């Protein structure tokens, strides 16, 4: 069931400079969108860890 599925882990490396949050998308929704897309692609849920990298000079101060 879900308990077993959540023991599986997925790591996401996100380069925020080359793949920024699209206009109109709330930054707080990004994680949920990534998890939903992974579940749809893999056909199962897993524990997701997201490593976001980027030059903060190019990222809105609202996100920091």
Image: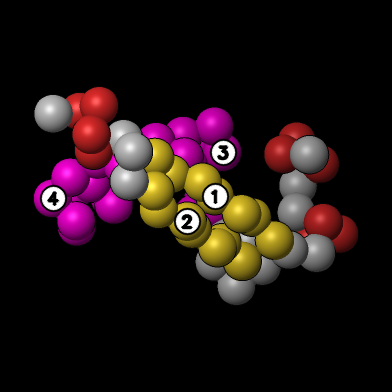
The alpha-carbon separation of the residues under discs 3 and 1 comes to 14 Å
Residue 2's disc is none
Bounds of the magenta segment: 21-46
Q: Nearer the viewer, residue 2 or 21?
A: 2
Mark 2: few/some/many CA within 10 Å (<14, 14-19, 20+): few
* 44 within the magenta span: yes
| Residue placed under numbered mark 1 in the picture | 50
Q: Are marks 2 and 1 in contact (CB under 8 Å)?
A: yes
Taking the spot 34% from the left edge, 38% from the top edge, the residue there is: 7
The quadrant of the rendering that contains the C terminus is: top right
- 12 left or right, relative to 47: right
Measured as percent of width and height from the top left, residue 32 is found at 39, 36
Taking the spot 70% from the left edge, 61% from the top edge, the residue there is: 53
| Residue placed under numbered mark 4 in the picture | 43
Dot 1 falls on a residue whose secondary structure is strand
| Residue placed under numbered mark 2 in the picture | 11
Measured as percent of width and height from the top left, residue 58 is found at 79, 61
């Amino acid at each position: 069931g879900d308990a077993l599925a959540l023991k599986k882990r997925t790591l996401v490396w996100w380069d925020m400079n080359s793949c920024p949050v699209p206009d109109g998308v709330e930054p707080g929704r990004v994680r949920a969108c990534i998890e939903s897309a992974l579940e749809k692609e893999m056909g199962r849920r897993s524990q997701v860890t997201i490593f976001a990298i980027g030059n903060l000079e190019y990222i809105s101060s609202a996100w920091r």
